[in-house]
Image: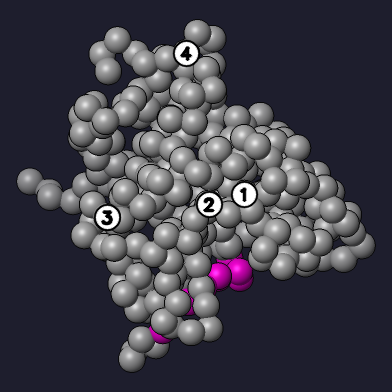
Amino acid sequence: MPTHRSRRTFLRQTGALLALAWAARAPARLAFARESPPLIAIDPGHGGRYIGAVLRGPGGVALLEKEVNLDVALRLAELLEQAGLQAVLTRDHDAEVAAVGEDVNEDGRVSEDDDLQARVDVANQAGAALCFSIHHNGAESSAVRGTATFYCQHHPRGAEAQELAQRLQVQFLEALDQLGYAPRDLGARDDAGLNKPYGHLFLAGPKTPRVARPSGMPTVVGEPLFVTNPTEGALLQQDDTRQALAEAYCRAALLFLQARGNGVLSPEC
């Protein structure tokens, strides 16, 4: 009898176990008054030629951020569906989102900004209630480590994004602690301190000369671990870490939606 399990089978089984584990701590499932439950947009950062942060080891490249981002995103999509929500991914494989050569943000040039605008457009067109942009940090020094979640207070939904970021940061820290790792809490932070072009992260920020169409929903950027730190990079190579981070995103979404009256606990929970 074959022992191999498909990713979908594995994630469905894991989601069922997670629901049982959550029962005593937080809602495992939400019930909704309207026919269609809220939809969560999931953006696995980077992809294709945009690789993100890199962990290098004695044998060369040990880990690429774009691959970790996608794996966590796929796990999260499955968990959200198990929890009674809908999910849309900006990408579901190793590829860029924007068509090659397309000036998506209409700024007169073709750049990575067009790929970022395409991701915002996916979330907007889907009518997402909130958006998670999944990233893992990088630094020139391998000694840098820490856990952070970013939002933009200048976004039209900035207050909601701050609340979502704070909830997600708590879930990140709890998940890592339960894995036996003592995270360095860098906080839920406004993106103004990152010195990005025009002052903001693309997906989380307001309209600027580079952002033609900002996100229409609260959007946060998760950076739970540093790919470039040997200890945190090693953690990210492990399935249980990736699953724990996906669960953290899912729990944050459930708690945020419940707190804002978007759902109520189903009786079986």
Image quarter in which the C terminus is found:
top left
Query: What residue is rendered at 36% in x and 72% in y?
Result: 233
Choose the circle earlier in sequence order: 4 or 2: 4
| Magenta stretch bounds | 48-56
The answer to whether one can see residue 116 in this image is: no
In the rendered image, the residue lying farthest to the left is 1
Q: Secondary structure at mark 2?
A: strand
Where is mark 4, residue-wise?
A: 32
The answer to whether one can see residue 144 in this image is: yes
Choose the circle earlier in sequence order: 4 or 3: 4
Which tag is nearer the camera, tag 1 or tag 2? Answer: 2
Q: Is the residue under label 2 in contact with that under label 4 (CB below 8 Å)?
A: no
> Depth check: 246 or 88 in front?
246
Q: Is the residue under label 3 in contact with that under label 1 (CB below 8 Å)?
A: no
> Depth check: 148 or 114 in front?
148
What separation in Å lies between label 4 and label 3 (alpha carbons)?
A: 32 Å
Q: Amino acid at mark 3?
A: Asp
Q: Secondary structure at mark 3?
A: helix
Would residue 48 appear left or right of 84 to someone viewing this image? right
Q: Is residue 107 above or below residue 78?
A: below
Which tag is nearer the camera, tag 4 or tag 2? Answer: 2
Where is mark 3, residue-wise?
A: 177
> Depth check: 259 or 40 in front?
259
Position in image of residue 241 (x %, y %): 30, 57
Where is mark 2, residue-wise?
A: 188
Mark carried by residue 151? 1
Which tag is nearer the camera, tag 4 or tag 1? Answer: 1
Q: Amino acid at mark 2?
A: Ala
Q: Amino acid at mark 4?
A: Phe
